[in-house]
Image (cartoon, grey):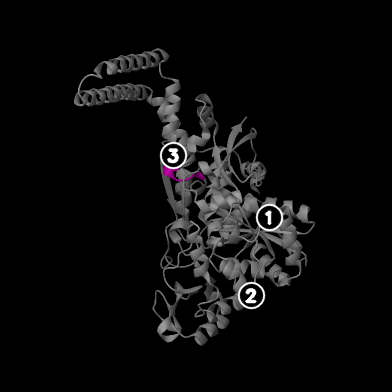
Amino acid sequence: MFLKTIEEKGKINFKSDFIDYSYLAGMKRLFMDFLGGESPAINYYKWNFRSVNDYFELADRLSSIEFPRQRLAEILWEDNCKIECASKIRDNIDKFSDPDSLVVIAGQQVGIFGGPLLTFYKAVGVVKLAAQLSKRLSKPVVPIFWMATEDHDYEEANSIYLVNSKGERIKIYNEPGDNQLGKSMSQIKLGEGIKKAISELQNNLLHTEYTDSLFGRISKYYKPGNKISEAFAGWVSELLRDYGLILLDPSNAEFKELAVPIYEKEIRGGYDTEVPNDKRQGDGLIADGYHLQVQKFKKGLNLFYADKYRERILLAAEEKGFILDRSQKKIDEARLVQLLYDTPEKFSSGVLLRPIVQSKLLPTVCFIGGASEIAYHSQLPPYYEYFNVIPPIIRPRPSVSLMGKRIRSIVDKYGMDIRLLFNDPHRVVNEVLIKYFPAGLEGKLNHLQMEVLDLLASISPELRNYDDGLRRTFASSVRKVETELNKLRAKIFQAHKKKNAEITGQILRAYDSFFPNGVMQERVLPMIYFLNKYSPSFADRLAEEIDIDRFQHQIISILPE
């Protein structure tokens, strides 16, 4: 039984507002310039994501390149065939086998219970753009989601957060089993800790008519013995069952075999200081006033080797060999290449090499990413050139905040400027409270200040015939009087704020709903929170509402009937 077959009551309506990214705290200049198509940022990217012509040009160039589509189709089906909604995925894999097929891709960590909302938003961006480009380009364009199964940050992948009635962030954590810390997610199977995590998740959610069925579904995937990546694939596919999202697991041994020539070139070029010349690229970014998203503090390859645990491969310059950063094991070039051919499954890409693998093996017309991913793509042109790969069009992912009916009523009640609420909630508090400040008292304070300052100003001409010291003392006294009057006004306003603490609390509660514990909502809350609260079809309806072409932050009000 799919989620959509669970009996529902009522209907969900949405209302969308949009705000510029400039109102979101922490947006870097590189991303903002890229978004606005401004120089010099655009010089670091080959294509313009807003240009229809660029999509056509890239599609034509990719059609002249031979990709291992048939072999990849077999690998992709092997990874996806066990998913319940596999028939839709099978259709897209068949389309991928077409020699003219193209790919839209995004990726994310395989977080428990589907990870935070931004994972869903990325997936929605991929499936909607693929459908859009299929019509526009008159070619089969398929959506692929790159599961970051080789990531080894256990804490991040196995934690999600909820917000309780007090606005407090509650951590739900899948405790690691023996010797799991430090390993790639592809190596980890769920243990007994997942049962505890599911229990804590359910206990911290309001019990609704959907809760039991919903947790029955999620427990089917997230259970002891299942790989984290398999559970993630099953759950995310179910959320987007009507779209046929293809899940790609880069840890698949057969997929790794296809990447061997790329990895070998990375190894053999380890000591070539000229190509790829990422230092020149980085120096250019810094000179243009931008930042480097990926900082390389140790000289090494953009490769990891995983035996007992995942290790970065560093250069051992004195011997023109390599050294594994954790075990300190030394390996010469010939031995490392031999290990690659014997056990390709033990090698994985670093952040700067992963996009090369994607575009070398897949006919990638577009990569959808967040601000940080877009930033590190500015460092990649030398790598694309070195590996003889055509870069994809880089496009911003959908960015969304959800607003419940209660928060929407607070925003409307006080006529808040939601842009300022995202940027400076305390300024919004002051602006709202000014509206509620007693008009008579405000007028009297203004009159008092004006009368006193006017009277003092009238005295000033009378002091022209006195010495400079007296005139300076008088001017200083006037400034002090004005300062004290402003202090008096501020103290009266603070008393007004204290008297109207409920208004302040409501406004800050609205802010906290968008930034739980100061972290953006899409990076904190999981989809299951909303499925449980509103309905199992919430994900379907939300996917329809998300706009992938505005390139602004979308605020979606949830208005159940």
- How many numbered markers are drawn? 3
Q: Residues within 10 Å of mark 2 (few under 14, many from 20)?
A: some
Q: Which mark is residue 164?
A: 3
Q: Earlier in the sequence, mark 2 or mark 3?
A: 3
Residue type marked 3: Asn
Question: Residue shown at 62%/76% (left/top)?
Answer: 257
Q: Which mark is residue 366?
A: none
- Badge nearest the viewer, 3 or 1: 3
The question of residue 107 being in magenta is answered with no
Quick check: can you spot residue 251? no
Question: Residue shown at 42%/26% (left/top)?
Answer: 503
Residue type marked 1: Cys
Q: Is residue 276 above or below residue 520?
A: below
The question of residue 519 being in magenta is answered with yes
Residue type marked 2: Leu
Q: Residues within 10 Å of mark 1 (few under 14, many from 20)?
A: many
**Circle 1 residue:** 85
Q: Which mark is residue 258?
A: 2
Highlighted range, magenta: 516-521
Q: Secondary structure at mark 2?
A: helix
Residue 392: horizontal and vertical position, in percent?
65, 62
Outermost residue, front side: 465
Quick check: can you spot residue 485? yes
Question: Residue shown at 57%/76% (left/top)?
Answer: 263
